[in-house]
Image (cartoon, rainbow, N blue to C red):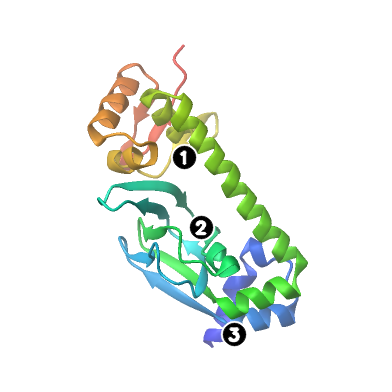
């Protein structure tokens, strides 16, 4: 029963849309569905890698920390995204930690099943490559933001990146804690709070229930 459920979940993942039924069968045999509560570390920076993960539901953050415990958030993952494939490709330790921001459902794919899939399916290999290129471009964009924009600009960029167009309005649907924004842009929580308050006073952001924000262009 679990095997068939795994196949059903994997079939809905865009990354695996090009797999044949036998290929999907093999992949399901090397996969396991896992559930984690909010605040759980799924993979830890520096540990050996044995699986890649597909996020089926929920949100998780990718972060790194230094020897003094200072943390930087590299990305926030949502449903349909995957992680952990880099370490499976180069056999290096995990380059970052992934921690759930809310209750999450994952599909874990073993190293053996992942590598077999790459050999069997050029379509999946190209999809993984596109994912790696997208992350490289996002890293370049983040470096540019940190180097060229002031704190106001960095906060505004984060809000725009996390927003989506709903009708004629641009809305940040998921609550973004000030501390999380601070870790994304390399600033203090206090500075982010001041910037957010200033953007609200100037009419650029309008707080809504449940932590949502409406982004506006001041006329």
Q: Is residue 209 above or below residue 100?
A: above
Residue carrying label 3: 29
Mark 2 highlights which residue? 79
Q: Give 17 or 143, whichever is nearer the viewer.
A: 143
Residue at the top extreme, as displayed = 219
Q: Which residue lies under the disc numbered 1? A: 162
Q: Position of residue 190 (x, y in %)?
A: 22, 31
Secondary structure found at label 2:
loop
Q: In the rendered view, would you say 36 is above or below 138?
A: below
Q: Which mark is in front, 2 or 3?
A: 3
Nearest the eye: 208 or 152: 152
What residue is shown at x 42% (from left), y 55% (from top)? 59
Depicted 114 relative to depicted 62: above or below: below
The mark nearer the N terminus, 2 or 3, is 3
Q: Which residue appears at 29% of the width and 38% of the height? A: 178
Q: Secondary structure at mark 3?
A: helix
Mark 1, other Cα within 10 Å: few <14 / some 14–19 / many ≥20: some
Whole-number angstrom distance, CA of label 3 to CA of label 1:
35 Å
Pinpoint residue 96: horizontal percent, then vertical percent.
42, 57
User: At which x and y percent is residue 30?
Assistant: 57, 82
Q: Which numbered disc flags the more N-terminal residue, 1 or 2? A: 2
Image quadrant assignment for residue 150: top left
> Residue 60 placed where, x, y %?
41, 56
Earlier sequence position, callout 3 versus callout 1: 3
């Amino acid at each position: 029963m679990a095997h068939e459920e795994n196949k059903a979940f994997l079939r809905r993942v865009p990354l695996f849309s090009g797999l044949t039924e036998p290929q999907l069968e093999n992949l399901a045999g090397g996969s396991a569905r896992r559930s984690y509560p909010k605040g759980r570390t799924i993979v830890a920076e520096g540990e050996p890698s044995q699986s890649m993960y597909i996020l089926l539901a929920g949100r998780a953050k990718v972060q790194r920390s230094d020897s003094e415990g200072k943390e930087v958030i590299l990305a926030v993952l949502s449903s349909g995204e995957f992680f952990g494939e880099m370490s499976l490709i180069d056999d290096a330790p995990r380059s970052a930690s992934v921690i759930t921001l809310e209750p999450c459902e994952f599909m874990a794919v073993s190293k053996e099943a992942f590598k077999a899939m790459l050999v069997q399916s050029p379509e999946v290999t190209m999809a993984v490559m596109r994912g790696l290129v997208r992350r490289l471009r996002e890293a370049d964009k983040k470096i540019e933001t940190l180097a060229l924009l002031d704190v106001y600009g960095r906060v505004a960029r984060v809000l725009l990146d996390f927003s989506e167009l709903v009708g004629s309005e641009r809305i940040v649907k998921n609550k973004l804690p000030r501390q999380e924004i601070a870790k994304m842009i390399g600033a203090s929580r206090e500075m982010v709070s001041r910037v957010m308050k200033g953007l609200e006073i100037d009419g650029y952001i309008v707080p809504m229930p449940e932590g949502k924000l409406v982004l506006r262009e001041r006329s």
